[in-house]
């Protein structure tokens, strides 16, 4: 068995004296693990860092085996990401989200999103909105997508201001007014067709929205806690955004 693909490194764990088991998100083969012989050497360690985009050749005797990776660099992002607390938490959070998906299931759209986010993880004004959109995409891929395109009560596509916690569907400001205390705020930047600026308050509302549905539909049914990296990412995002505003 053999294939070649590009991937973004999510993490690595030691294996034996000299090797590592590398975890990657690939373009055509989903989240995939493989053994890298000699991966703990001085030459290989800088290459096998989270956030790096690499060319992968995977070989195994049988498809269900762990197999071995041959790894070559395409884009070395790790050094840049390590200089930013937001980026460090961000790449860890991407890995935690992707581990919710079955291993080796192809999700080309998620891979492209990871590639774009990785390019901007050290830019708070871009990373914040991108990551919450990624969480919405994860909910969609897991079968719990939200409908933020039109009002669940009126069918109106304008003035969307809330999301129903029961249905996950948007509601306009006027239609939702009688129940506003029971609804989740819907930040405007999530429904804007063009990129729009997201304030810190809008980002908080957006992550509160995705967090609610991740907890109810994903974490709690699986007996999981929210990843520590999510709290770390949000704290670092708040510090960065407040610092830029100041």
Image (tube, rainbow, N blue to C red):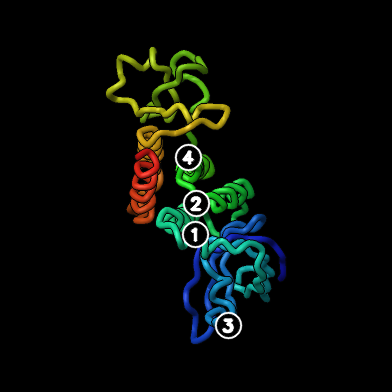
Q: Which residue is mark 4?
A: 129
Residue 43 appears left or right of 158: right
Nearest to the observer: residue 174 or residue 52: 52
Residue at x-position 36% and y-position 17%: 176
**Distance between the alpha carbons at the discs numbered 1 and 4:** 18 Å
Say which label, 4 or 3, has the lower sequence index: 3
Say which label, 2 or 3, has the lower sequence index: 3
Mark 2 touches mark 1? (CB < 8 Å): yes
Against 140, residue 14 (above or below) is below
Nearest to the observer: residue 153 or residue 190: 190
Neighbourhood count class around disc 1 (C-alpha, 10 Å): few under 14, some 14–19, many 20 upward: many
Nearest to the observer: residue 147 or residue 206: 206
Neighbourhood count class around disc 3 (C-alpha, 10 Å): few under 14, some 14–19, many 20 upward: some
Neighbourhood count class around disc 2 (C-alpha, 10 Å): few under 14, some 14–19, many 20 upward: many
Say which label, 2 or 1, has the lower sequence index: 1
The location of residue 241, given as percent across then percent down, is 38, 42
**Distance between the alpha carbons at the discs numbered 3 and 1:** 24 Å
Say which label, 4 or 2, has the lower sequence index: 2
Residue 100 can be seen in this image: no
Residue 179 appears left or right of 35: left
Against 108, residue 184 (above or below) is above
SS at mark 3 in the image: loop
Say which label, 1 or 4, has the lower sequence index: 1
Residue at x-position 36% and y-position 28%: 185
Judged from this view, the residue extending furthest toward the front is 246
Q: Which residue is mark 3?
A: 38
Q: Which residue is mark 2?
A: 121
Neighbourhood count class around disc 4 (C-alpha, 10 Å): few under 14, some 14–19, many 20 upward: many
Nearest to the observer: residue 228 or residue 204: 204
Say which label, 3 or 1, has the lower sequence index: 3
């Amino acid at each position: 068995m053999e294939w070649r693909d590009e991937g973004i490194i999510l993490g690595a764990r030691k294996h034996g004296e000299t090797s590592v088991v590398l975890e990657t998100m690939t373009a055509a083969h989903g989240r995939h693990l493989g053994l890298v012989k000699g991966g703990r050497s001085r030459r290989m360690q800088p290459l096998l860092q989270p956030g790096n985009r690499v060319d992968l050749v995977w070989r195994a005797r049988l498809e269900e085996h762990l197999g071995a990776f041959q790894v070559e660099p395409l884009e070395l992002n790790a050094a840049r990401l390590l200089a930013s607390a937001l980026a460090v938490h961000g790449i860890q959070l991407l890995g935690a989200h992707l581990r919710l998906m079955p291993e080796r299931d192809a999700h080309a759209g998620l891979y492209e999103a990871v590639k774009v986010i990785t390019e901007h993880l050290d830019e708070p004004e871009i990373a914040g909105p991108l990551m919450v959109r990624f969480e919405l995409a994860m909910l969609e891929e897991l079968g719990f997508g939200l409908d933020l395109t039109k009002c669940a009560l009126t069918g109106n596509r304008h003035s969307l201001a809330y999301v129903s916690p029961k249905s996950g569907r948007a509601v306009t400001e006027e239609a939702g007014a009688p129940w506003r205390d029971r609804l989740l705020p819907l930040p405007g930047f999530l429904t804007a067709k063009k990129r729009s600026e997201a304030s810190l308050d809008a980002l908080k509302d957006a992550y509160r929205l995705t967090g609610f549905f991740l907890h109810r539909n994903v974490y709690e049914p699986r007996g999981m806690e929210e990843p520590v990296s999510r709290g770390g990412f949000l704290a670092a995002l708040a510090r960065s955004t407040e610092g830029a505003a100041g």
